[in-house]
Amino acid sequence: MVNKLVSSLVAKRSRLPRRVNAMIDRLVAPGTGPLGRAVQRLGGVAVGGTVVPPPRVPEGSVRLYVAPTNYAGQGYLWCRAVERELDGVGAVNMVAEADHGFRFPADDTVPIATYLMSRRWQQEREGYVRRFTHVMFEAERPLFGRLHGGDAFTEARMLRETGLGVAMMCHGTDVRLPSRHRAASPWSPFHDDPRFDVLEETARRNLAGLAALGAPVFVSTPDLLEDVPAATWCPVVVDGDRWHAEADALERTRLRVVHVPSSSAVKGTNLINPVLERLAAEGVLDYEHVQGVPASQMPAVYARADVVLDQFRVGSYGVAACEAMASGRVVVGHVTSSVRDHVRDATGRDLPVVEATPDTLRDVLLEIAEDRETYRTKAAAGPGFVASVHDGTLSAAALRAFLLGP
């Protein structure tokens, strides 16, 4: 119950100004805040009485700790990649998990209430992390909850002063500057996002923090290089075997088109739904808008599709597009030319995501329905692209200098 309550509060914080969040922090601070003391009395064991021991510290000469977001399981998968590809490296990831029903593999799953409100957990975890040689902060989030004021940059400096190597991994809205993105794209989600001011403040604060810290910075998607030009792209990792589909795409009379938005506002669902509904009414395709499906069931969702619609507002591609490509589906979305160019320059391969905007989507889908042979070739290129770029090999290579030196 306590974790569900705290999860609900955390989910709403992204919509609130910083000063309001600061007031909430004072109210819920463990031991000193009135709500924090009340929740600890109500939650008792759930918050601080029982602290599950963390995983064993790796024995390698290089020991990497990655935390605390594990978006789409990437923290866990980057850890496995460096262990597999870099000699002498052991790694552990931790996720502070909200009670939202979606879970990805992790070495250490900590309830968000414990992470934020258990002073015992925070202090014990700091001692544990000091036994590693390197740490990578995800999305500029703190490793130890509110122990050091909830500031990742304060923690990073403290750990660096004790001799640990420190790096930052940027994921998206933590550094994507809404004002820049809105000016650059008519499809930007920031044209109508009510959180614009809050997100702008957060991104500017994080970008300033990264510049002041001077630590290595990585980005999980290449579009973020527009906001953090000095960063290194560390590709997301996808297990291609898990997403392999036996049936070929584009064998049905009517296209089966699937859209699985993790965030409808960011993916542009409202911009493309009218197009898809009209094409479905005309008999061109069958449209399936999927929401709330657990990650474990997603391979089956993609396997029954011909075309997967990714996102049409941000101008990039991420884990979902890679999973759909690994399934051998035709993946359609809006990816800017600068992102495509960077992928080609960095990997020597063209990104096999079919380009479309909300304005051109109808024509693109009609062309796919008419010229199936061409688009079967596009679909067939997906698994090879993912195996080459997103199997973890290039990700480990991106992290090599940070972990092993130049």
Image: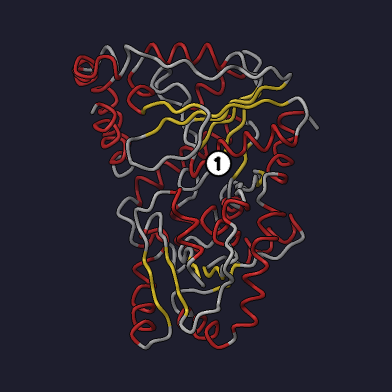
Residue 40: x %, y % from top left: 24, 16
Residue nearest the observer in this picture, 8 or 137: 8
Q: Residue furthest right?
A: 406
Mark 1 closeness class: few <14, some 14–19, many ≥20 residues within 10 Å:
many
Residue 372: x %, y % from top left: 59, 83
The quarter holding residue 234 reads top right
Residue 357: x %, y % from top left: 48, 74
128 with respect to 111 (left or right): right
Residue 320: x %, y % from top left: 51, 56
Residue nearest the observer in this picture, 271 or 87: 87
Amino acid type of disc 1? Answer: Gln
Classify the position of the N terminus by image quarter: top left
Residue that numbered label 1 is attached to? 74
User: Which residue is at 61% across, 53% downward?
Assistant: 222
User: Which residue is at 37% across, 27% downward?
Assistant: 111
Classify the position of the C terminus by image quarter: top right
Residue nearest the observer in this picture, 200 or 160: 160
